[in-house]
Image: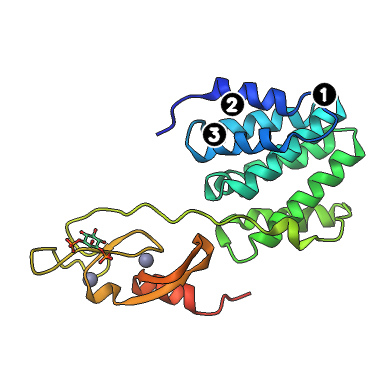
């Protein structure tokens, strides 16, 4: 799935976090995000490399690595969220808080964890982030005021369409008379009865009414439990 372009990734990351830079090189940082989005580098590898830079003794290198991390979370959608939303990655961030001596780096890490907890407030699978905020608060960390703008992420990408010879919901077998249809929200394949609903999918940047399955119609149209 991933062509190993990690050497190109490493080169760009070294450049983006060079201590010779006076400020973040945003075009370069977005190129790094593209490598992840295109599948040129494994998200796990990318985040491990970024994390290594966070504990760099040079404050510029450490801070630039956080700028890269912040952009990856904002631009790469679930590819990166699935990595940073884990207990393991949250533990690594907490360790970094203990290792780094740079106050601005500590503050930035607190800002990021808090913004992600807010962004993922309705996503149970990333509950480790909110758990980490709660734990760190009991450990005495002072989180800065939340800037909601930090928690706005670009749209995730709509899922690829699955294939199958029967309806994902009612299991009816497809035939000339029983046609395949796809739900744009989950990408699964269904019979016409199980996808006779439509709705917009703003989170994927889909503003027109598109075909969705019963389950996704419920999820998208019922008010999210806060
Ligand atoms: O029914 P057909 O003409 O064979 O083609 C199907 C339609 O194009 C469906 O579009 P839809 O989901 O918008 O209905 C699509 O989801 C299926 O993959 C195609 O096999
Ligand atoms: Zn069906
Ligand atoms: Zn669906």
Question: Is the CB atom of the residue marked by disc 2 within 8 angstroms of ligand 3's nearest atom?
Answer: no
Mark 3 surroundings: few (<14), some (14-19) or many (≥20) residues within 10 A: many
Sequence order check, earlier mark of 1 and 2: 2
Mark 2 surroundings: few (<14), some (14-19) or many (≥20) residues within 10 A: many
Location of residue 200 in the rendering, given as x and y in whole percent from the top left corner: 45, 72
**Which quadrant holds residue 29?**
top right
Instruction: Write the residue at 56% across / 38% down.
Output: 34
3D distance between C-alphas at marks 1 and 2 = 18 Å
Residue linked to disc 3: 35
Q: Are marks 3 and 2 in contact (CB under 8 Å)?
A: yes
Ligand 2 found in image quarter: bottom left
Instruction: Write the residue at 16% across / 68% down.
Output: 172
Sequence order check, earlier mark of 3 and 2: 2
Q: Are marks 1 and 2 in contact (CB under 8 Å)?
A: no
3D distance between C-alphas at marks 1 and 3 = 22 Å
Q: Which mark is residue 31?
A: none
Residue 125 visible in this rendered orientation of the protein: yes
Mark 1 surroundings: few (<14), some (14-19) or many (≥20) residues within 10 A: some
- Viewer-proximal residue among 50 and 160: 160
Residue linked to disc 1: 19
Query: In this rendering, would 151 be left or right of 155?
Result: right
Instruction: Write the residue at 80% across / 28% down.
Output: 61
Measured along the vertical axis of the image, is residue 119 above or below residue 66?
A: below
Question: Is the CB atom of the residue marked by disc 3 within 8 angstroms of ligand 3's nearest atom?
Answer: no
**Secondary structure category for the residue under label 1:** loop
Query: In this rendering, would 34 be left or right of 52?
Result: left
**Secondary structure category for the residue under label 3:** helix
Sequence order check, earlier mark of 1 and 3: 1
Residue linked to disc 2: 9
Location of residue 176 in the rendering, given as x and y in whole percent from the top left corner: 8, 64
Q: Which corner quadrant holds the C terminus? A: bottom right
Location of residue 18 in the rendering, given as x and y in whole percent from the top left corner: 77, 24
């Amino acid at each position: 799935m991933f062509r190993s372009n990690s050497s190109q990734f490493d080169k760009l990351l070294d450049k983006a976090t060079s201590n010779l830079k006076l400020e973040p090189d945003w075009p370069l940082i977005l190129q790094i995000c593209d490598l992840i989005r295109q599948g040129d580098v494994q998200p796990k590898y990318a985040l491990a490399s970024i994390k290594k830079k966070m504990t760099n003794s040079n404050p510029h290198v450490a801070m630039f690595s956080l700028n890269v991390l912040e952009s990856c979370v904002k631009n790469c959608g679930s590819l990166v969220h699935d990595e940073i939303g884990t207990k393991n990655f949250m533990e690594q961030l907490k360790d970094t808080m203990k290792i780094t001596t740079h106050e601005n780096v500590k503050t930035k890490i607190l800002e990021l964890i808090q913004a992600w907890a807010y962004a993922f407030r309705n996503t149970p699978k990333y509950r480790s982030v909110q758990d980490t905020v709660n734990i760190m608060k009991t450990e005495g960390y002072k989180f800065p005021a939340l800037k909601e703008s930090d928690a706005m992420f670009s749209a995730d990408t709509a899922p690829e369409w699955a294939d199958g010879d029967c309806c994902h919901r009612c299991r009816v077998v497809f035939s000339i008379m029983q046609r395949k249809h796809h739900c744009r929200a989950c990408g699964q394949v269904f019979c016409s009865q199980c996808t006779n609903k439509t709705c917009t999918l703003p989170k994927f940047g889909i503003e027109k009414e598109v075909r969705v399955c019963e389950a996704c119609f419920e999820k998208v149209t019922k008010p999210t439990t806060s």
